[in-house]
Image (cartoon, rainbow, N blue to C red):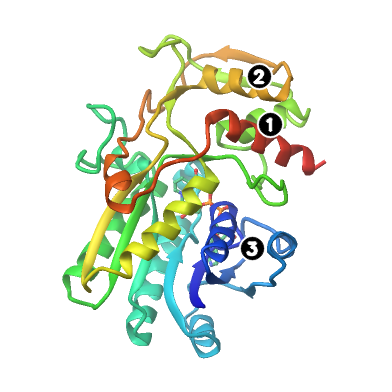
Amino acid sequence: MKKILITGGAGYIGSHTALELWNAGMEPIIIDDLSNTQENVIDRLEEITGKRFSFYKGDCNSRELLDQIAADHQIEGVIHFAAFKAVGESTQKPLKYYRNNIGSLLVLLDWMRDHGIQDVVFSSSCTVYGQPEVLPVTEATPRQEAESPYGNTKKICEDILVDFVKSKAGVRVISLRYFNPVGAHSSAKIGELPLGVPQNLVPFITQTAAGIREKLTVFGNDYDTPDGSCVRDYIHVMDLADAHVKALSFLGKQELDFYEVFNVGSGRGNTVLEVIHAFEKVSGQKLNYVIGPRRPGDVVKTWADTTKINQVLGWYPQYSLEDSMRDSWNWQKSLG
Ligand SMILES: NC(=O)c1ccc[n+]([C@@H]2O[C@H](COP(=O)([O-])OP(=O)(O)OC[C@H]3O[C@@H](n4cnc5c(N)ncnc54)[C@H](O)[C@@H]3O)[C@@H](O)[C@H]2O)c1
């Protein structure tokens, strides 16, 4: 069984990807410092799969720990999720974000080269596009100046990967630019675990419905969009997990010194109000929300053109927005 190192594998997207790798016949080896998740995610993965995944609790900036993992396992590929991702905090503590998000990639690439590990899939983000002038967004859409240190770390990491491949380091790399991951595994045993006040719409919706938040504020309903609220591309986390499996399989068939980037989204734009209504429909709950003023810095509308990932990786999303809302709600209810 091919062993794949998943950095940040106990986190939201990492844990679902660990599951999909296992379902595809690969063995995930997880490293996570638990800075934004809980150790019981590993227990939950065992409950779902019947397999206890190897788990290393620690920082993937630690070369010693990575060397230990390479001594314990013959790693054949890496998916690098580990990063800090709170956009707001990144503007307050930029060095924390640059150190972790960029530092960990540098340590990882050195380690891969020294151990002859060739394949890596990197978690990038649609944030690199900012507010695109032309929609939908293709991979050829120019990247814009980052709006936050977090967004900048994604741009810089992509550039580091391009330069590393150009240097003939003997690796194959895919950067996946995620749009808005939502949903949870249908078992409701794993899902997103936001610390504190959620920064993303869907956890805020489910926490409001659960009575943890008093109300949801929709930031603006007078934009140039179908109902005036902002438009995003929501992608179910299991579809996103599947994209990683397909990316790894594809990488294994390429020549060395390969780099490619793919958008991962549903290919549809949904407004904030549409998401709220989809949630109300599947949950049978009336959501307490109010319309507030526009929020400075918000991207008004963005959604992905997914032609490239459809055609090259043969990846197509399987889940609808309603599926995402149902699974997110079941996950929220399971948290009690
Ligand atoms: N969720 C999103 O909306 C979104 C969108 C685009 C891109 N991304 C990127 O996808 C990746 C995964 O995101 P997520 O939503 O699963 O976040 P997450 O916080 O749930 O997962 C990241 C995991 O990495 C761990 N981690 C952080 N730094 C670490 C370190 N130095 N060593 C070991 N573990 C470390 C955290 O404990 C966490 O479990 C991140 O790189 C993020 O920037 C996320």
What's the amino acid at mark 1? Thr
What mark, if any, has residue 281 been given in the picture?
A: 2
Residues at circles 1 and 3 in contact by the CB criterion of under 8 Å: no
Q: Quadrant of residue 139?
A: top left
Side of 287 relative to 267 (left or right): right
| Residue 142 percent location from the top left of the image | 20, 40
Cβ at disc 1 under 8 Å from ligand 1: no
| Residue 307 percent location from the top left of the image | 28, 40
What's the amino acid at mark 3? Leu
What's the amino acid at mark 2? Lys
Q: Residues within 10 Å of mark 1 (few under 14, many from 20)?
A: many
Q: Nearer the viewer, mark 3 or mark 2?
A: 2
Q: Which residue is mark 1?
A: 206
What is the C-alpha distance between the residues marked 1 and 3? 23 Å
Task: Answer yes or no: is residue 157 visible.
Answer: no
What mark, if any, has residue 195 been given in the picture?
A: none
Cβ at disc 3 under 8 Å from ligand 1: yes
**SS category of the residue bearing label 3:** loop
Q: Residue at x 48, y 15 (%)?
A: 220
Side of 42 relative to 303 (left or right): right
From this viewpoint, which residue is outermost toward the right? 336
Q: Which residue is mark 3?
A: 34
Quadrant of image for the C terminus: top right
| Residue 275 percent location from the top left of the image | 55, 23
**SS category of the residue bearing label 1:** helix
